[in-house]
Image: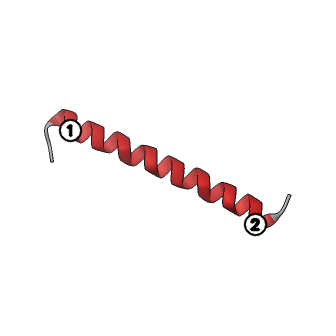
Amino acid sequence: MDIVWIAALALFWVALIVGVDGLLRLVRAKKEGRP
């Protein structure tokens, strides 16, 4: 495989995990009634 392809895939997964984690934190904050 090409190094560039591997790097792009890794960046995609990192962004996906960070995005999901951020969404879960937002949902938890709303459930707790915090802004």
The kind of residue tagged 2 is Val
Measured as percent of width and height from the top left, residue 31 is found at: 20, 33
Q: Is residue 24 above or below residue 13?
A: above
Q: Which mark is residue 7?
A: none
Rendered image quadrant of residue 3: bottom right
In percent of the image, x 60 and y 54: which residue is there? 12
Identify the residue position indicated by label 1 in the image. Answer: 30
Q: Is residue 22 left or right of residue 2?
A: left
In percent of the image, x 68 and y 55: which residue is there? 9
Quarter of the figure with the N terminus = bottom right
In percent of the image, x 60 and y 50: which residue is there? 13
Measured as percent of width and height from the top left, residue 20 is found at: 44, 44
Element at badge 2? helix
Identify the residue position indicated by label 2 in the image. Answer: 4
Element at badge 1? helix
Q: Is residue 18 left or right of residue 7?
A: left
Give me the C-alpha separation between circle 1 and circle 2: 39 Å
Measured as percent of width and height from the top left, residue 5 is found at: 76, 60
First along the sequence among labels 1 and 2:
2
Rendered image quadrant of residue 21: top left
The kind of residue tagged 1 is Lys
